[in-house]
Image (cartoon, helix red, strand yellow):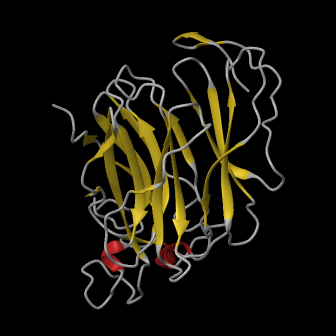
Amino acid sequence: AGAAVTGLGQVGAFPLARSVPSPADSNFGDITIGPSGQVMVAFQSPISGEGPSKLYVSVDPDGIGPLPFGKYLLAGSTNLGGFTSIPAQSGNTIDAEVGIAYDRSNSVGRGRAYLIYTTGSNIYRADTSIKLSVSSDDGRTWSPPQKLETDTVQSSQFLPRLSVDPISGDVAVTWLDTRNDANPAKSKIDTDYKANTDAELWGIVLKPVSTGEQASANFRISQGASNSRLARNSIDFGDFLGLTFYNGKIMPFWSDNSNSTKDNPAGSHRSFDMYTAVIRDPFAV
């Protein structure tokens, strides 16, 4: 459902919701508005079981206008189903966590749609990865998937989040990452002598150029590592992270029980708090 916004606090009425064409057993979606008012929805299907599954998008070409969402289009595939278990998220599981965002800036990337998702290895269960694909034609075609993390060990990357700076067009992606806990015997962050259970928040920024995207180095955001097993809750790290990116400033939002700020009432590696940070765009002049 959509409504017109004409100013601060000036939001029109939401009409009846529109259906999005989709296969049966579809869920875990995201939504974005393009520079011409078009609306793209992305989702995963099927979600039952541990995978594999497909990633689809559907576009409403005039947003809140009279036209409906178009037929769903294949955007990618993943080895993960809707409920895949990894060591860092063994209780709550993970899915592809597909994310979608348009570039509404006046950069060379204006009109590009960015799609991120999690996929997994058929060889090693904890070895998951974050992939990015790009469309310049409203989802009809997509670039080959690009791996975003640059670690060289079998580790878990999960719960990715995506945001595009509407001023510069630069793209920020964050995710939880166990690369520094892949080998507990050599890990400086290990809390439980188990591999791939301690996660840190990592990120990357991509700058649109005429030939594609220029990627920054991976960078660690969280100051400490968190362990959901030690929190002993029912949802582990949760189902989603948060992220916004505006005018060169990146602000993620994530579950953290490292107590790196020394003010978690429960102490270290127990109940989760919600953390945030402000990161400067590495491509900003």
Instruction: Give the residue drawn at x 35%, y 26%.
Output: 108
Instruction: Tell me if 151 is positioned left or right of 239 in this view.
Output: left
**Above/below status of 124 relative to 205:** below
Farthest residue in the left direction?
285
The location of residue 141, given as percent across then percent down, is 58, 40
Q: Residue at x 33, y 37 (%)?
A: 211
Q: Position of residue 130 (x, y in %)?
A: 46, 59
Question: Where is 68 relative to 228, above or below?
Answer: above
Outermost residue, top direction? Answer: 6
Q: Residue at x 25, y 39 (%)?
A: 281
Along the line of sight, the residue nearer the viewer: 50 or 256:
50
Q: Residue at x 80, y 39 (%)?
A: 21
The N terminus is located in which quarter? Answer: top right
Drawn side of residue 79 relative to residue 17, left or right = left
Residue 271: in sight, yes or no? no
Q: Quadrant of the C terminus?
A: top left
> Would you place residue 181 above or below residue 247 in this image?
below
In the image, 204: left or right of 197?
Answer: left
Q: Position of residue 62 (x, y in %)?
A: 67, 18
In this view, the residue in front, 265 or 249, is 249
Dividing the picture into quadrants, the one containing residue 109 is top left
**Percent x, y of residue 103:** 45, 29
Number of marks in the rendered image:
0
Q: Does any portion of residue 174 appear in the rendered image?
A: yes
